Image (cartoon, helix red, strand yellow):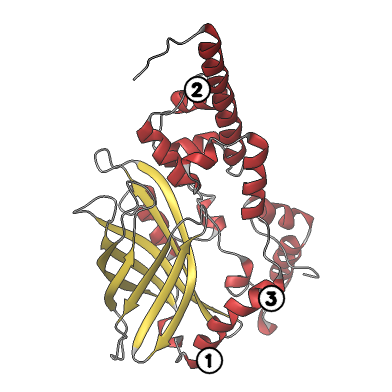
Amino acid sequence: MQFRAHSRIDAGMASYYALSMSDDLHRNLSLVCGYFPSIAEVCRKLGINRQQFNKYLAGSARPSRHNMRRICDFFGVSEAELLMEAGQFEEIIALRRKPVQQEELSRPLRHLDRLYQRSQSLEKYLGYYFRYFYSFGNPGRVIRSLALIYREDGKHYWKNIEVLRDPVTGRSAGLNKYEGVLFYLADRIYIMEYESVEMNTITQATLYPSHRSRLDTLLGIQTGGPTRRGRKPGASKVALEYLGRDIDVRAALALVASGEAPLGIVYATDAAISEEVKVLATFPAASHAAIAYPFAILKDRADPRTRALFAFLTGPEGRELFARFGFATAAGS
């Protein structure tokens, strides 16, 4: 066996390749971080110190093997891909994020249509729920999230918001948002949801329907896995606590403001009056009926004072007051 001493040329080439790889790494990291609102959000969800992550972005430091695995899992790429030449990596990411053409969607959507056709009515289950399940990422802990079952264009859908908290300090450590579909097939309710921000995980739940006249709790099993901490798949018992078709938004606001509840669903105008809460997400307008507060002068109350108040509320000053507190006036009103 022969050994050869490294020459200056060998050392120079090794330094060149290390520099090139480091340069590509920080360029590629910058590219994928650009798909998120801020670097701070990426660091918070990764659980990596912002100052340290900035060194990775600047190319002045390279992640440890542990942090490299966390970064790759978070962005949904392999280590080999993250270390690719920057131009080649950009092409791969562009292909993965390329919108799927409608004709390409027709085949997979056909399976959903067949399930919707066989699904029984879920009208009884419309409304808000607390969802409880054993955490996949923090063994022994139970996660409570806020969910909504709603109907749109004759089909039923699912939304779920989950606040992640540090198990030691109890402080918010991130937010997961889920969207999905529901089917009621052969006396079982099936929920299929995906994480709608990072789109890196799918959860499936099977629930026993309620045959009582009054809906209270739905029980079942869900499968999935943590979005971090190794991403090992698992299964857990799950319970949905029914809150009602509508919820007391002021009570929800008070619970969140006092810290008794991690999150709540309220009207935007109610959230605006409290300095103790922060708006994390909004439901799309198509997911619910329009929220309107109509008013008119009653036929037997058309006295001058009532007409004066009505004129004030519908006039420029009244509209300005409504706008200041987050209300929009309907066209023609």
Asked whether the viewer can see residue 230, the reply is: yes
CB under 8 Å between discs 1 and 3: no
Element type where label 3 sits in the image: loop
Which residue is at 39% across, 63% downward?
A: 146
Closer to the eye: label 1 or 3: 1
Q: Which mark is residue 296?
A: 3
Q: Residue furthest right?
A: 332
Residue 98: give x, y in percent of width and height: 67, 57
Mark number displayed over residue 278: none
- Where residue 2 sits, quadrant-wise, is top left
Q: What's the distance in space between the residues labelled 1 and 3, CA to CA?
A: 44 Å
In three-dimensional space, the C-alpha distance between marks 2 and 3, rounded to whole angstroms, equals 62 Å
Q: Amino acid at mark 2?
A: Lys
Q: Which residue is mark 2?
A: 55
Q: Nearer the viewer, residue 294 or 29?
A: 29
**Which amino acid type corresponds to the residue marked 3 in the rendered image?**
Ala
The answer to which image quadrant residue 235 occupies is bottom left
Contact (Cβ within 8 Å) of mark 2 with mark 1 = no
Front label number (2 vs 3): 2
* Earlier residue among tags 2 and 1: 2
The answer to whether residue 263 is visible is no
